[in-house]
């Protein structure tokens, strides 16, 4: 099941890069997109640790080394793709971002 989920994400990422190639970059850097966010190293480390703990395999070093970077890259690329295909306003208004009707 995990491989099917990863395959779906890879398909979304490929389609997103096609959208980038077509010039769909207007939503990538909206002004004030990161206003009010915390950027200190401690917050980043806490977020990673929380993710590893929720994963359930946090005490398996091999699982951490293999899966955490792979999942991080997949989801960062997926979010990049979302910003190339839908506007931030559409994203906020949507309950499920991945199924929003794409712009022509």
Image (spheres, helix red, strand yellow):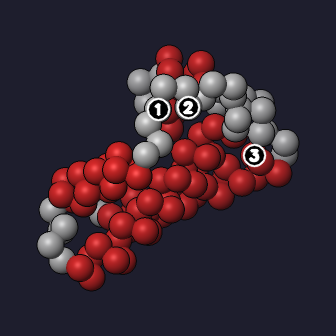
Residue at image mark 1: 37
Q: Quadrant of the N terminus?
A: bottom left
Report x, y in % for residue 4.
39, 63
Expressed as whole percent of the image width and height from the top left, the position of residue 10 reads 54, 61
Residue at (47% x, 53% y) in the render? 75
- Is 104 above or below relative to 1? above
Q: Give SS at disc 3.
A: helix
Q: CA distance from mark 1 to mark 2?
A: 6 Å
**Relative to 51, 3 lies left or right:** right
Determine whether the residue tagged by mark 1 lies in a helix, strand or loop: loop
Q: Tell which circle, 3 or 1, labels the residue nearer the N-terminal end.
A: 3
Residue in the image at 63% along x and 37% along y = 83
Q: Mark 1: few, some, or many residues within 10 Å (few <14, many ≥20)? A: few
Q: Is residue 13 left or right of residue 19?
A: left
Q: Earlier in the sequence, mark 3 or mark 2?
A: 3
Residue 34: mark in rendering: 2
Q: Residues within 10 Å of mark 2 (few under 14, many from 20)?
A: few
- 58 up-or-down from 96: above or below: below
To which quarter of the image does residue 90 belong? Answer: top right
Percent position (x, y) of residue 25? 77, 39
Which image quarter is the C terminus in?
top right
Q: Which residue is mark 3?
A: 19
Of 78 and 6, which appears nearest the observer? 78
Q: Position of residue 33 (x, y in %)?
A: 60, 29
For image coordinates 43% across by 46% down, the residue present is: 40
User: What distance separates the C-alpha of mark 3 from that of mark 2?
Assistant: 23 Å
Proximity of marks 1 and 2: CB atoms separated by less than 8 Å = yes
Dot in front, 3 or 1: 1
Q: CA distance from mark 3 to mark 1?
A: 28 Å
Left or right position of 30 against 2: right
């Amino acid at each position: 099941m995990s491989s099917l989920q990863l395959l779906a994400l890879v398909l979304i990422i490929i389609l997103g890069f096609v959208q980038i190639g077509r010039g769909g970059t207007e939503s990538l850097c909206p002004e004030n997109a990161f206003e009010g966010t915390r950027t200190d190293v401690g917050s980043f480390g806490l977020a990673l640790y929380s993710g590893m703990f929720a994963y359930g395999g946090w005490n398996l070093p091999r699982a951490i080394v293999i899966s955490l970077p792979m999942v991080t890259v997949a989801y960062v690329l997926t979010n990049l793709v979302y910003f190339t295909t839908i506007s931030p306003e559409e994203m906020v208004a949507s309950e499920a971002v991945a199924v929003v009707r794409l712009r022509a």
